[in-house]
Image (spheres, grey):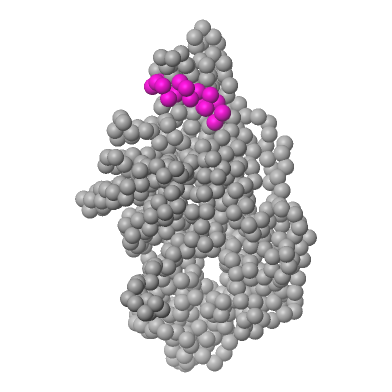
């Protein structure tokens, strides 16, 4: 199955679930991974400029995706942004906003994809949730927002532009709502439609936190509340969550999985009862359409917690939504001389103002259970390669006085940055004669930190809480690790990471020694990264074969093994539960970051009733936040697939397995 087939399957499931519109972000830093360097072209013998380097190949093929949506008979909402948030690394990290927006718009025009050209795109979005930050920027923030709106409108797409969470979006841009609920929301002008850009179907997960679930009874209730008040468009965020492959997950600490408890799970499989219950909701709402599009609702109290929202058209169409907002009590109400029983925290939909065709709290018994089953694929003959920490600063191209912020050095070319300095210990120091260790304190803004203590003439010394230093010159190396860059918040581009100090040695005769303003050498990335071990099977690296027993729990170790693809079409995943923390690749494609961080949180039973927030309905406490990592079948060959793992902390690679995801229904 190639990536297009997976797209087609998910799009079709969305259509079968009653959706009319597919919404997608445009991921700037995916399509333009580095600034478009314009250089004078000489191949044609003229001064034409080489075009900016964009990536729209493979799974980045935006036009292909939109055409598949069109082929399925669905519409498209294209959220260009270009800032998107999305728990994505730097939120897409805009550089030259107008140029990129113009690039995307022109691509769509060239392919005749806007609705005015006969295409599927009926809406576009400029910016994203800027209203949350605009007050922190004051007048310049308002000026920027106004400029962005004007810039977008002047591109002449022929379809409306929106700004979500931007209450003062200037005409004709439509301001829209994001959230768990949007029934409270009204656009800033009465002639603008009421649009819910993101109806949150669940929540994203962080390494070390529990897994979030949103009961479908409450999600359906929220959507029905929005529609009964006159809402015109609802988009689920997410309907299919997917996977943060590579180093795209932001946060920091956002998991590689972006499943989001969506109706279609990360692997493209249907999650029940969420999928079917929402499908029935969509059917019920569509039965009400003749009345919904003809009139505004009339609201009548049916009790202390009960209301009727009635849509009546002059042509005789009538639809009603009967709501019970009580958290625990069923209510019997009288509407048009008939009695109706309403469960707590629910809405009944009557497309003819007489017969209930759907209630948000009454869910069928069909429930899906996911299992990860063995594929019997053999992962044997592992080979290993260890990072040589003794040569960390040998090839360093940067040595300065003081500690530097990590991103300013790495430019996000790697998650890893080595900080190395030397410390001279006088042979007369008292701790040497008492057989004691010094203590090192490192204040780091990095997301993770590994410390290696190296002598100039001996091999690595294990860090045990103290510093085993000796008379003479000692080298201290700190490996700072980023686990995703921030993706929202005012001025988040200025937030620091890395070893910022102080770095202090305690226990010396003259008192603490601050190492922060010594000379430090910097090395971006790992030796294995520079040797391209992730994708180069025939590399210059001296891979070691044999038993993995001696390598268990060894930090900073690369592992590789070859395997054959399993038969069938079941979605696949790697079980990384035996490993610690690191990254994993298959055939050179990055599966993403893994981290066997155990979840803490409130995993007590929950009820669907009452206002949902992400701290409610959590599971997985005491278990790894993420154990299984999605492997697209389109990335596999029938035989000879290369699996490469880089382990930071130490793990048992012999217990890594390839499993398949199977769904059973009860």
Residue found at x 44% / y 30%? 226
The C terminus lies in which quarter of the figure? top right
For the N terminus, which image quadrant?
bottom right
| In the image, residue 250 above or below residue 158 | below
Residue 210's spot in the image, x, y percent?
56, 49
Q: Which residue is at 39% across, 67% downward?
A: 52
Residue in view at x 60 percent, y 37 percent: 16
Apparent side of residue 373 relative to residue 106 in the rendered image (left or right): right
Q: Is residue 30 visible?
A: yes
Residue 545 placement (x, y as % from top left): 72, 80
Q: Is residue 458 left or right of residue 153?
A: right
Please tell me which residue is depicted at 54% across the width and 31% down the height of the picture.
282
Q: Which residues are magenta?
A: 282-297
Farthest residue toward the front?
A: 45
**284 falls in the magenta region:** yes
Q: Quadrant of residue 356?
A: top right
386 sits left or right of 247 in the view: right
Of 388 and 122, the residue lying toward us: 122
Q: Does residue 176 lie above or below 331 as drawn? A: below
Please name whichever residue, 339 or 579, is drawn nearer the observer in this view of the structure.
Answer: 339
Res 443 visible? no
- Residue farthest along the right direction in this orientation: 376
């Amino acid at each position: 199955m190639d990536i297009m087939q997976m797209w087609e399957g998910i799009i079709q499931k969305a259509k079968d679930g009653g959706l009319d519109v597919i919404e997608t972000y445009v991921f700037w830093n995916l399509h333009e991974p580095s600034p478009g360097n314009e250089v004078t072209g000489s191949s044609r013998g003229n001064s034409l400029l080489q075009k900016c380097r964009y990536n729209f190949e493979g799974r980045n093929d935006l036009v292909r995706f939109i055409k598949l949506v069109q082929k399925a008979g669905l519409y498209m909402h294209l959220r260009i942004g270009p800032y998107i948030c999305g728990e994505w690394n730097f939120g897409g990290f805009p550089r030259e906003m107008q140029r990129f927006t113009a690039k995307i718009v022109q691509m769509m025009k060239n392919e005749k994809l806007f609705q005015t050209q006969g295409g599927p795109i009926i809406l576009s979005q400029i910016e994203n949730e800027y209203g949350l930050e605009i007050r922190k920027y004051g007048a310049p923030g308002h000026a920027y927002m106004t400029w962005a709106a004007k810039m977008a409108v002047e591109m002449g797409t022929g379809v409306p532009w929106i700004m979500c969470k931007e209450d003062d979006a200037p005409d004709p841009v439509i301001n829209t709502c994001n959230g768990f609920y949007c029934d409270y929301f009204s656009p800033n002008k009465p002639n603008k439609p009421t649009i819910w850009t993101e109806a949150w179907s669940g929540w994203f997960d962080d390494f070390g936190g529990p897994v979030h679930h949103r009961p479908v009874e409450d999600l359906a209730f929220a959507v029905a509340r929005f529609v009964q008040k006159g809402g015109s468009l609802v988009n689920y965020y997410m309907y299919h969550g997917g996977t943060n492959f590579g180093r795209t997950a932001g946060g920091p600490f956002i998991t590689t999985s972006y499943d989001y408890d969506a109706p279609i799970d990360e692997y493209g499989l249907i999650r029940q009862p969420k999928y079917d219950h929402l499908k029935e909701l969509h059917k019920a709402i569509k039965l009400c359409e003749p009345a919904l599009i003809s009139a505004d609702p009339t609201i009548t109290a049916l009790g202390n917690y009960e209301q009727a929202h009635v849509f009546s058209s002059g042509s005789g169409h009538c639809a009603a939504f009967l709501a019970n907002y009580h958290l625990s009590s069923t209510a019997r109400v009288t509407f048009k001389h008939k009695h109706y029983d309403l469960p707590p925290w629910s809405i009944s939909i009557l497309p003819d103002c007489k017969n209930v065709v759907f209630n948000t709290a009454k869910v069928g018994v069909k429930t899906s259970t996911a299992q990860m089953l063995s594929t019997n694929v053999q992962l044997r003959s592992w080979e290993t390669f260890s990072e040589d920490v003794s040569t960390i600063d040998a090839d360093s191209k940067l040595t300065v006085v003081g500690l530097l912020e990590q991103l300013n050095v790495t430019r996000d070319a790697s998650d890893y940055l080595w900080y190395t300095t030397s410390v001279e210990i006088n042979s007369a120091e008292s701790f040497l004669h008492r057989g004691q260790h010094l203590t090192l304190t490192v204040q780091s803004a990095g997301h993770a930190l590994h410390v290696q203590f190296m002598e100039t003439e001996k091999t690595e010394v294990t860090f045990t809480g103290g510093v085993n230093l000796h008379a003479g010159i000692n080298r201290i190396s700190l490996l700072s690790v980023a686990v995703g860059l921030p993706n929202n918040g005012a001025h988040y581009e200025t937030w620091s990471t890395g070893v910022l100090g102080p770095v202090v040695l305690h226990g010396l005769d003259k008192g603490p020694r601050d190492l922060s303003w010594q000379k430090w050498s910097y090395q971006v990335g790992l030796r294995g990264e520079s040797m391209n071990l992730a994708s180069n099977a025939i590399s210059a690296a001296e891979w070691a074969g044999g038993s993995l027993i001696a390598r268990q729990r060894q930090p900073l170790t690369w592992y590789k093994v070859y395997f054959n693809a399993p038969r069938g079409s079941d979605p696949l995943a790697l079980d990384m539960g035996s490993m610690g923390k690191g990254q994993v690749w298959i055939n050179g494609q990055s599966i993403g970051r893994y981290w066997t961080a155990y979840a803490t949180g409130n995993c007590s039973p929950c009820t669907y009733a009452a206002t949902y927030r992400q701290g409610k309905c959590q599971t997985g406490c005491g278990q790894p936040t993420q154990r299984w990592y999605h492997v697209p079948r389109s990335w596999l060959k029938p035989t000879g697939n290369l699996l490469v793992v880089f382990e930071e902390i130490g793990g048992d690679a012999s217990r890594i397995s390839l499993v398949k995801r199977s769904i059973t229904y009860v």
